[in-house]
Image (cartoon, grey):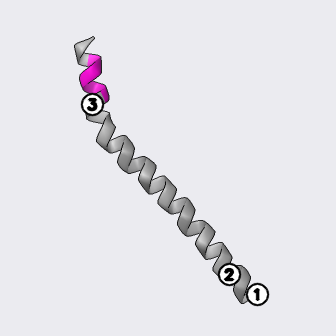
């Protein structure tokens, strides 16, 4: 039971990390994408 809890915690942490990385990437690229739209 304790092992299952640890595994669940690791899975949730990895999902949150993936979402955080996606959010950071989007925030960093958003101004660049907007700049491209202005150029076109």
Asked if the stretch drawn in magenta spans residue 36, the answer is: yes
**Could you say where residue 25 lies in the image, as x and y percent from the top left?**
37, 45
User: Residue 35: image x %, image y %?
Assistant: 24, 24
Q: Which residue is mark 2?
A: 5
Residue drawn at 73 percent across, 80 percent down: 4
Q: Label 3: which residue? A: 32
Give the percent coordinates (x, y) of residue 29: 32, 37
Asked if labels 3 and 2 touch by Cβ distance under 8 angstroms, the answer is no
Our reading of the magenta stretch's main secondary structure is helix
Task: Return the disc, 1 or 3, that comes first in the chain's sequence.
Answer: 1
Q: Which residues are magenta?
A: 33-37
Q: Residues within 10 Å of mark 1 (few under 14, many from 20)?
A: few
Q: CA distance from mark 1 to mark 3?
A: 47 Å
Q: Real-space Cα distance between discs 2 and 3?
A: 41 Å
Mark nearer the N terminus (2 vs 3): 2
Query: What secondary structure is marked by label 1?
Result: loop
What SS does tag 2 mark?
helix
Task: Decide: is 26 above or below 5.
Answer: above
* Residue 36 position by quadrant: top left
In this image, 15 relative to 24: left or right? right
Q: Could you say which quadrant of the image residue 15 lies in?
A: bottom right
Name the residue at the right extreme.
1
Query: Residue sitting at 71 percent across and 88 percent down?
Result: 2
Secondary structure of the residue carrying tag 3 is helix
Most extreme residue toward the top, as rendered?
40
Classed neighbour count for the residue bearing mark 3: other residues with Cα under 10 Å, few (<14), some (14–19), many (≥20): few
Residue for badge 1: 1
> From what the image shows, is residue 38 above or below residue 28?
above
Q: Residue at x 29, y 18 (%)?
A: 37
In the image: residue 35, left or right of residue 11: left
């Amino acid at each position: 039971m304790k092992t299952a809890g640890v595994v669940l915690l690791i899975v949730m942490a990895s999902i949150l990390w993936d979402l955080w990385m996606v959010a950071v990437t989007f925030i960093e690229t958003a101004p660049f994408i907007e700049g491209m739209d202005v150029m076109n």
